[in-house]
Image (cartoon, grey):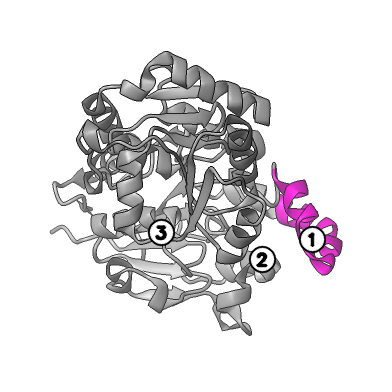
Amino acid sequence: MTTAPRVALIHYWLVGMRGGEKVLEALCRMYPQADIFTHVHDSAAMSDTIRAHRVTQTSVGRLPFAKRMYQSYLPFMPGALEALDLTGYDLVISSEAGPAKGVIVPPDAFHLCYVHSPMRYLWDQYNVYRDGAGMLTRAAMPLLAPRLRMWDVTSAARVDSFLANSTHVANRVNKYWRRDAAVVHPPVDVAAFAPVPRAEHGDFYLWAGELAPYKRPDLAIAAFRELGLPLVMIGGPEKTRARLAATAPDNVTLLGKTDFATLKSHMARCRALIFPGEEDFGLVPVEVMASGRPVIAYGRGGALDTVIDGETGLLFRDQSVDGLVTAVRDFEASGLADADPARLVAHAGQFDEAAFRRGVLGALEATNLGINPVIHENANFIL
């Protein structure tokens, strides 16, 4: 007699719906009976898909103001993960961008880790985060980071198999943890986007996303100050939007956060997306290509997996004002603004949720679990 396996999903924290939570949603749909474990859980900020599952917080979630100050409690997270009791679970899938993979699983369970990114603030972005932190955090980071790095590397040895959301992340997994990771791109809801007739296309360029320093909104504004072409920027937070808008030229419009209909309309009508930051994967370029429009992206990070240079967009190598100005002028001369929307939509289609499912299930099929799993159409497996 066969019995359904018990599946545990480990996610770093659940305080908002961003890219990592979209991956968790897809895993929830694959394993509707799975239990979720996380450090901090804000149920009101979650989707119905995630709320339908039983969610257990680690001890970090019981600390004061955890929903707001969760990142300050990073030093407590390794111990909190190791204290979780996962007895009886057959499959554990951890979703790693903050500490999640360090759980201790039963000896006969299989641990698959999906990596959005090794913790940036411990590794390649350590100095960036430290320089931008407050006085107390700047003083504490050099004291805490070495021990946390050692735990991060040690806990990687507990994982049976790794998946990475891009080639860029797979390379960093190998660099910092000395483990191999197969690339399975995260699920993008490409069906939610669609082209509009050419007559509805505008003459503006688009920048979209959180106004975070590493996404380089400052670079986009400076380049378009020189170009004099219209640029629309969508994203918050409001405090950052107001600061940037105060010095932006007249040809740059900062709309702040908008509803989905407004964002979708701008994606489908823009001349091209401006994507000047280095990201682990980057959902926005795929969403814009699913809207039938091309992308001008900095040629590092996840954009190398999603944008085909000269076909679905243009990649530039010099992350500077001059580099972006040159890229936009090259784009104007290339004819890419008239690229076939159907070609762009077809390219974006390879990043849909079905492709993500196949990748995850393929990783489970390819491993020697010792239990001969049978994969079913509903994406659950039976022992």
Q: Which mark is residue 144?
A: 1
Q: Residues within 10 Å of mark 2 (few under 14, many from 20)?
A: some
Highlighted range, magenta: 125-149
Q: Is residue 316 visible?
A: no
Q: Nearer the viewer, residue 158 or 223?
A: 223
The answer to the question of whether label 2 and label 1 lie on touching residues, with beta carbons closer than 8 A, is: yes
Q: Nearer the viewer, residue 122 or 330?
A: 330
For label 3, the SS is: helix
Front residue of 59/4: it is 59
Q: What label sits on residue 74 in the rendered view?
A: 2
Q: Position of residue 164 (x, y in %)?
A: 47, 39
Above or below for 41 versus 146:
below
Query: Per the image, is 288 magenta?
Result: no
| Element assignment for label 1 | helix
Question: Regarding mark 2 in the picture, which secondary structure is present there?
Answer: helix
Q: CA distance from mark 2 to mark 1?
A: 10 Å
